């Protein structure tokens, strides 16, 4: 079918060169047949100066149809090429999130809420963290804060300046199993993180869109120069979300032995008749 259409189109295009020499009836027939063939390639109409199909010049239609046919026949190759570029990136994202999931499993084995993360720079894991709030008796020791402190201590030992530390964070990508809370999202914003990928949403305390969108805006201009200013960062959720939710479900189904015990017995309500 493709070869047949190509032969017809080439024949009509050849006739266009002789169009001024043909009788008026033949010219009209040739013009209409060419427009009928080109109607199959109307997605390329935006290349022409007008949206009125019947006002196109035959030569303009010839150019558009030729380009359209070439693009349509090359669509398979282009799609394959783009897919080949996307696939390694997606597989890398999954591999990094797998490492974060592993950290979350370590947290659950330590009877901590199962959240884990890894920091990636130049394709390498440079730090990892997991929840340690119960172990440290410190409610701020979330997975992200643990990994951030590891990096700060390392770069301080290496003698990096504040500017160099800021540059390093601007080249880091964070993979974390649960959306960063407001505290962690604010810290990441102040540090100037480049990008964050997270698993499931944090519908109670999320700072990347669920409650606040700290990733999408920067500090107001009236903040003093002495105070670090927040920077926006790219945030993408839903990466291995089912696995992250499954860890939470398993943790809470087995019961949290570190959960606070109620201080008083539940009050039974009496129903009066």
Image (cartoon, rainbow, N blue to C red):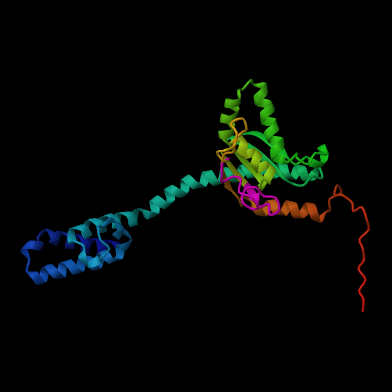
Q: In the picture, residue 52 is in which quadrant?
A: bottom left
Q: Image point 57% across, 26% down: which residue?
A: 163
Asked if residue 109 shows in the view, the reply is: yes
Q: Image point 64% across, 21% down: which residue?
A: 158
Q: Position of residue 75 (x, y in %)?
A: 37, 54
Whether residue 157 is situated above or below residue 86 in the rendered picture: above
Q: Nearer the viewer, residue 6 or 240?
A: 240
- What main secondary structure does the magenta stretch of the protein show? loop
Q: Image point 20% across, 59% down: which residue?
A: 10
44 to the left or right of 255: left
Q: Position of residue 233 (x, y in %)?
A: 56, 42
Quarter holding the C terminus is bottom right
Query: Is residue 237 located in the magenta-colored stretch of the structure?
Result: no
Q: Position of residue 157 (x, y in %)?
A: 67, 22
Whether residue 198 is situated above or below residue 30 in the rendered picture: above
Q: Position of residue 44 (x, y in %)?
A: 31, 58
Farthest residue, direction top: 159
Extent of the magenta region: 198-219
Q: Nearer the viewer, residue 127 or 29?
A: 127
143 to the left or right of 27: right
Q: Image point 10% across, 72% down: which residue?
A: 25
Quarter holding the N terminus is bottom left
Whether residue 196 is situated above or below residue 8 in the rendered picture: above
7 to the left or right of 218: left
């Amino acid at each position: 079918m493709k070869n047949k259409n190509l032969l017809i189109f080439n024949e009509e295009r050849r006739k266009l060169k002789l169009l001024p020499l043909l009788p008026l009836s033949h010219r009209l027939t040739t013009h209409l047949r060419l427009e009928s063939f080109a109607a199959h390639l109307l997605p390329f109409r935006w290349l022409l100066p007008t949206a009125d199909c019947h006002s196109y010049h035959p030569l303009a239609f010839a150019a558009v149809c030729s380009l359209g046919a070439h693009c349509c026949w090359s669509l398979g190759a282009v799609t394959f090429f783009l897919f080949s570029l996307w696939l390694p990136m997606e597989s890398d994202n999954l591999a990094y999130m797998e490492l974060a999931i592993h950290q979350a499993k370590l947290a659950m084995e330590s009877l901590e809420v199962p959240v884990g993360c890894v920091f990636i720079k130049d394709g390498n894991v440079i730090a990892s963290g997991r929840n340690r709030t119960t172990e440290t008796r410190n409610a701020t020791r979330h997975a992200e804060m643990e990994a951030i402190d590891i990096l700060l201590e390392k770069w301080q030992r290496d003698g990096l300046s504040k500017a160099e530390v800021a540059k390093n964070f601007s080249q880091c990508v964070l993979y974390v199993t649960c959306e960063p809370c407001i505290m962690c999202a604010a810290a990441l914003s102040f540090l100037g993180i480049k990008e964050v990928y997270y698993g499931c949403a944090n519908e109670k305390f999320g700072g990347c869109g669920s409650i606040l969108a700290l990733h999408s805006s920067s500090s107001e201009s009236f903040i003093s120069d002495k105070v670090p200013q927040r920077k926006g960062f790219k945030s993408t959720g839903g990466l291995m979300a089912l696995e992250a939710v499954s860890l939470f479900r398993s943790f809470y189904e087995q019961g949290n032995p570190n959960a606070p015990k109620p201080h008083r017995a539940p009050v039974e309500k009496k129903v009066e008749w």
